[in-house]
Image: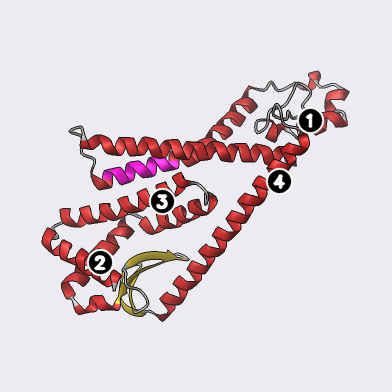
C-alpha cells in the first residue's frame, strides 16, 4: 500500500509541476499579442486558455493510457500449443508479481519486482513521508469539499428565496435582495441568472447586465465554474492552480464584455453599467 500511495503522490506532484509550467507558458503567449501584429482578443485567449488547461490536466492520464495500450498490443500472445502446465497455473509468487503491474510505473522497481526506496531514505522514513503527505492532502480535500458544500447550500437557499422575474428558454431570471452582484449559475442542471434588486431601478443598466449574464451561458461559463471549483479543491495548496482559476475567470468576464460591445452595445452605456454595478458592490 505504501508503494502504491507513493506512486500516486509522485504522479500528483508531476501534474502539479505541469500545471505551473503551463500557466507560465500561457501567460507568455498572452503577452505576445502586445508585441506582435497578432490579435486574439479576449474570446480567443479564453478559448486558448481552456485548451491549454484541459491538455495539461488530462495529458498524464492520456499518456498512461496510451502506454498501457501500446504494451498490451505489443505483448506476444502464446498459442495453445505453447501453453505449458506451468504457464496455465503460474506459481503464487508470479501472481503476486502480476498484481503489481498497475503500480510498477508509479514507483521504480528492481529486476526482482521489489520497489526501490530513494537513495538516502530508509523504508520507515518513506512510509512516514507518504503517510504525512497523504494526511495533508486528504485533510485539504475534506476542508475544500466542506466549504464547497456550504457555498452550494447557501446558493440554493438564495435561489429559493429569490423572486422569479422571467424565463428565457432554460434560463430562469430571478431577483434577490441577498446579493449586490449579478451572477450566472447552474445548480443541479438548473440555469439561473440572479440580479440584485437594486438593478430594477434602472432599465438601461438592467438590460445590459442581463445580456452580459446570458452571454456567460452561450460560452458555457457556469459549467466551467463548476470544473474550476473542483480543480481548486484538488490543488488547494498550489499557487499556480489559484492562478489558473483567476486567469480563466477574468478571461470569461472580458470575453463577455467584448462580445456585447461587438454586438452593438454602446461603449458609454456599457461603461455606465459597469460603474453602476461597482457602486452597488461597495455599498
Q: Tell me the element at label 1.
A: helix
Which of these two is toward me, 50 or 172? 50
Question: In the image, residue 53 lies at what x, y percent?
Answer: 42, 42
Which residue is denoted by mark 3 in the rendering? 245
Asked if residue 226 lies in the magenta stretch, the reply is: no
N-terminal of the two: label 1 or label 4?
Answer: 1
Residue 165 in picture, x, y percent from top left: 30, 78
Alpha-carbon distance for marks 2 and 1?
63 Å
Quarter of the image for the N terminus: give it.
top right
Per the rendering, the mark at residue 97 is: 1
Residue 3 x, y percent position in the rendering: 72, 37
Q: Nearer the viewer, residue 92 or 47?
A: 47
Query: Residue at 50% of width from left, 46% of height from top?
Result: 238
Residue 51 lies within the magenta run:
yes
Sequence-first disc among 2 and 3: 3
| Disc number lying in front (4 or 3) | 4
Mark 1–mark 4 distance (CA, rounded to whole Å): 24 Å
CB within 8 Å, label 1 to label 4: no
SS label for mark 4:
helix
User: Does 93 appear above or below 228?
Assistant: above
Badge 4: few (under 14), some or many (20 or more) residues near its Cα, within 10 Å? some
Amino acid at each position: 500500500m505504501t508503494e502504491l500511495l507513493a506512486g500516486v503522490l509522485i504522479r500528483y506532484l508531476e501534474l502539479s509541476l505541469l500545471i505551473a509550467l503551463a500557466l507560465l507558458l500561457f501567460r507568455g503567449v498572452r503577452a505576445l499579442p502586445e508585441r506582435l501584429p497578432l490579435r486574439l482578443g479576449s474570446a480567443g485567449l479564453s478559448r486558448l486558455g481552456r485548451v491549454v488547461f484541459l491538455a495539461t490536466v488530462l495529458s498524464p492520464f492520456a499518456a498512461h493510457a496510451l502506454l498501457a495500450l501500446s504494451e498490451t498490443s505489443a505483448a506476444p500472445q502464446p498459442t495453445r500449443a505453447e501453453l505449458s502446465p506451468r504457464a496455465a497455473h503460474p506459481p503464487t509468487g508470479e501472481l503476486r508479481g502480476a498484481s503489481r503491474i498497475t503500480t510498477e510505473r508509479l514507483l521504480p522497481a528492481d529486476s526482482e519486482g521489489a520497489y526501490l526506496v530513494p537513495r538516502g531514505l530508509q523504508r520507515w522514513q518513506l512510509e512516514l513521508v507518504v503517510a504525512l503527505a497523504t494526511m495533508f492532502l486528504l485533510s485539504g480535500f475534506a476542508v475544500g469539499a466542506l466549504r464547497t458544500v456550504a457555498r452550494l447550500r447557501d446558493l440554493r437557499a438564495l435561489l429559493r428565496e429569490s423572486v422569479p422575474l422571467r424565463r428565457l428558454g432554460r434560463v430562469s431570471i430571478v431577483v434577490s435582495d441577498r446579493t449586490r452582484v449579478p451572477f450566472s449559475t447552474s445548480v443541479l442542471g438548473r440555469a439561473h441568472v440572479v440580479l440584485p434588486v437594486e438593478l430594477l431601478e434602472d432599465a438601461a443598466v438592467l438590460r445590459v447586465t442581463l445580456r452580459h449574464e446570458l452571454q456567460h451561458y452561450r460560452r458555457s461559463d457556469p459549467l466551467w465554474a463548476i470544473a474550476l471549483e473542483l480543480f481548486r479543491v484538488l490543488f488547494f495548496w498550489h499557487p499556480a492552480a489559484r492562478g489558473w482559476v483567476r486567469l480563466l475567470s477574468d478571461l470569461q468576464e472580458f470575453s463577455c464584455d467584448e462580445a456585447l460591445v461587438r454586438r452593438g452595445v454602446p461603449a458609454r452605456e456599457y461603461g455606465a453599467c459597469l460603474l453602476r454595478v461597482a457602486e452597488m458592490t461597495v455599498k
